[in-house]
Amino acid sequence: MSVLVVVLVGVLFAVAAYLMMRRSIVKLIFGLLLLGTSANLFIFVAARLVPGRPPIVAPGQSTLEPPFADPLGQALILTAIVISFGVLAFAMVLVKKTYQAIGDDDLDALDPVSREEEG
Amino acid sequence: MSALWPVLWPLLTATVMGLLWRHPVWHRWIGVGACFAHVFIAVHLMGEANGRGPVVTTLGGWKPPFGIVFVADRLGAAMVLVTAVIGFAIALSSVRGIDARREAFGYHPLVQTLLGGVCGAFLTGDFFNLYVWFEVMLVSSFVLLALGGERRQMAGALHYVSYNLVASATFLIGMGTLYGSIGTLNMADVAQRLPQANPAVAAVVVGLLTVAFGVKAAVFPLFTWLPASYHTPPTLVSALFAGLLTKVGVYALIRTTTLLGPDSAPWLPGVLVVVAVLSMGFGVLGAVAQDDFRRVLSLHIVSQIGYMLFGLALMTPLALAGAVYYVLHHILVKTNLFLIGGLAKRMCGTERLAGMGGLYRRSPGLSLLFLVPALSLAGLPPLSGFWAKLFVVRAGIEADAWAGVAVALACGLLTLFSMLKLWNEAFWKPAPQEPTEPLWTARRKWMAVPVALLAIGTVGFGLFAGPLFAFSERVAEELLRPETYVQAVLGGSK
């Protein structure tokens, strides 16, 4: 189970890196999105996968019997997902505005623009 | 006092501004008032941290290492104090320095959330919480950078956003590895446990964190986002960024290196020396080649970060004290240079050095105000930059790091050269065309006030180098004995 997720994380990282190195601005955003997702999945698997053992203290007992699934790792991911959702929403609007301002989907078209004088 | 106040105060201010969204003119004065109060909060916290040792605040009554903890030791409190001062200067300048459209879209509240994020990053004692404050700061800076929607702003913001998102992902992966290996994210607890973990895993963790913080600090070779974006927003925004954002990265590097470095990653100082020397060199060479006021200043940030890292990498008490003094001095000086750049741009109508000129003849006062931070940056006595460089270079000589010392001195010379280039082009040479409008409008006079305040601060930083350096030495002492920090955070729960 873990191995499968690990492979998935690796593939996602590779896809993200590939997309980010393309010249298209839209692909850059897809790359960033996948990078964030794969980082979250990475934390998920690094905090150990323990299927079918929720961290709930059984009736009549005062402590948890290991092994149990660690809820903290998942709480961290939840926070990271919320943050990356907000940031990526902003990034997508930015990409749209950039495309409108530059009229090109090519990252190489950015450089001359950033050298312009303010009008 | 709770170590949370310097973080909550700007966020509270931003909320009040949000409630008064339709009255952006009120935002200006709320901002000035709140930032003024922020300075006092920071001074108070500083007094406590300096007098009685680290101020520790646990959130929600959860004892560390289980809950999130805020720690104001001398370094954190000093950084918060300088942040508050810069915040005040920017708020004062913003009263008349920002256009109505940007104000209507929330410029003032964004400055406050940025300050809140920066202070949060300086005070938190938990790695994941550090990530959260980084993001608070970054999102505010993303919007500030893109606000206004000019073509070149969009181009700059895209570089900045994508590079920083990659850094955030790197930080997250580092944290995942950390949590997966030792099951804690509390900095003090990590400092205790990481040495017992698998050395290979520890190396991966420290390496990932260093790369992530290196991007934020804009060190070689991770600095390219900075010259691509810092010259695009309004100068006030650049000034705020230039003073604070990269220094948050430097702070995080200082914190992790001193807490985790010696035990978990003995190779780290060696790497940092190389990075520091390359940052110094490439930054200054890049700056010398530029022909635009703000681009010259932006690349100097990279070079100066190199000096701070050089001090950090040597890890002797003198070097670390020098690095701390350097950070504090540089925040004041760099913000001031950008603010003056903004004034000069308004006066000349351009930032291209070729199109500027004649400012010395028309306003000797402004020229003097430029010379104070410019010569301080270049390291001329008795200004603060001289002492900062002196401490770092002397530490380098004592540690026999001759190559680093040689590069540091050569870069000092090149810094002086490029400051003189700015002087010659913008101030000394005759104006390309005879100016028609008056130089000092009421708005520009107002914007010169914070410049003058920061210049006085810079002179004071140089004149009182003795006591300030003594303080930096106490900071260094605290940093070199992480047991104090660990004890202050975990003491109660062990």
Image (cartoon, rainbow, N blue to C red):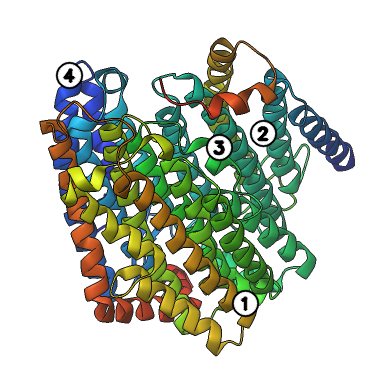
Residue lying at 29% horizontally and 31% vertically, measured from the top left: B109
- The chain that hosts pointer 4 is B
Residue B262 image label: 1
- C-alpha span from label 2 to label 3: 23 Å
Label 2 in the same subunit as label 1: no
Looking at the rendering, in which quadrant would you find the N terminus of chain A? top right
Please determine whether, in this image, residue A89 is positioned above or below residue B123.
Answer: above
Disc 1 crowd rating (10 Å Cα; few below 14, some 14-19, many 20+) is: some
Instruction: Indicate which label's residue lies in the foreground, 4 or 2.
Output: 4
Tell me if B287 is positioned left or right of A106 in this view.
left
Q: Please tell me whether mark 3 sits on a helix, a strand or a loop.
A: helix
Nearest to the eye among marks 4 and 3: give it: 3
Labels 1 and 4 positioned on one and the same chain: yes
- Mark 2: secondary structure: helix
For residue A36, which numbered disc appears in the image?
2
Q: Are marks 1 and 3 on the same chain?
A: yes
Q: Chain of mark 2?
A: A
* Residues at discs 2 and 1 in contact (Cβ within 8 Å): no
| Residue on which disc 3 sits | B228
Residue at screen point 28% across, 58% down: B371
